[in-house]
Image: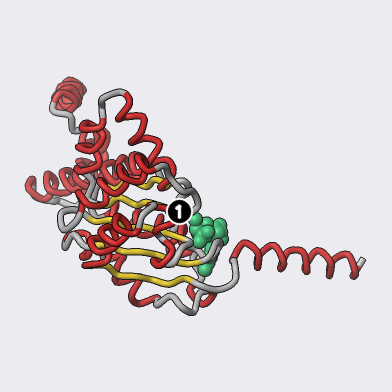
Amino acid sequence: MADNTHLLLRSNLKQLKLPTMGAEFEKLAREAAAANEVYEQYLLRLTELEVAARSANAVHTRIKSAGFPVLKDFDTFDFTAVPSLSKPKVLELARGEWISERSNACLIGSPGTGKTHVAVALGLAACRQGKRVRFVTAGALVTQLEEAQKRYQLDRVLAQLDRLDLLICDELGYLSFSRAGAELLFQVFADRYERRSLLVTSNLAFSEWNQVFQGERMTAALLDRLTHRCQIFEMNGESFRFRESMKSKKNRKADADKN
Ligand code: ADP
Ligand code: MG
């Protein structure tokens, strides 16, 4: 085919914002000619590539904007290390129906038991399903809300949070908040009730949440909304970090003894 046609085609595809088609049409055309494909088959294969590239890009963008602290998935999570956690139930959650149903999930357990790891893996699964996700620690969220309030931008920040299909609020309980901070967090949680999903991780049992939210009335009101339609996972046991560091210490000692 004349070079001119290729140039024009490339320019049209660029103008139409179809970069993958632009990059692939020549190769695919050669293959189609060699295989005697009909025109529609060629066009179909070419558009399929564009569609696939777009959805991969969209997933990538959603993962980036979710703000995960690390990218950890279920393939590196050892469920046998946390017998209290039901693998089938967690994998069921990873299918994302709970987010479409606007219900919640809580991961409760001592430090190092994999709460953040599982929360990130669930968030990644949701991103891949086309959901808008944001991962934030409770402390950072409260700081963000307080600062927004000071700048008279609270409504804007709340509206942004409201657009998320899933808000992951990690590490509730490590820091306690001022009364005003706790009220702002309460507002976010209460706003999402039955409208948007929330995933909370905490080292505190529910009975201890009033340490964070100051005041039994607010805690009770919050827990009532959060747990109304909520899957609760208890992740108790020895700290994975601790266990790993003991293991490597033991290995180092064994190596030293060998030498
Ligand atoms: P938590 O949030 O409960 O304090 P993390 O999720 O941060 O715990 O886990 C601590 C570290 O141990 C992370 O690097 C995490 O990937 C790892 N980890 C924890 N539990 C497991 C597990 N069951 N399988 C694999 N890695 C784990
Ligand atoms: Mg954590």
Q: Nearer the viewer, residue 138 or 10?
A: 138
- Please name the amino acid that badge 1 sits on: Glu
Q: Residue at x 20, y 65 (%)?
A: 97
* Location of residue 219 by image quarter: bottom left
Locate the C terminus by quadrant.
Answer: bottom right
Pointer 1: residues within 10 angstroms few (<14), some, or many (20+)? many
Residue 77, horizontal then vertical, whole percent? 49, 66
Beta carbon of the mark 1 residue lies under 8 A of ligand 2: yes
Q: Quadrant of the N terminus?
A: top left
**Image point 36% across, 54% down: which residue?**
215
Q: Nearer the viewer, residue 13 or 254?
A: 254
Where is residue 98 shown, x and y percent of the image? 22, 64
Residue beneath label 1, please?
Answer: 171
| Front-lying residue, 27 or 259 | 259
Which residue lies most toward the right here?
A: 259
Colouring method of the image:
secondary structure
- Residue 167 in sight: yes
Q: Which type of secondary structure does the marked residue at label 1 adopt?
A: strand
Q: Residue at x 37, y 51 (%)?
A: 169
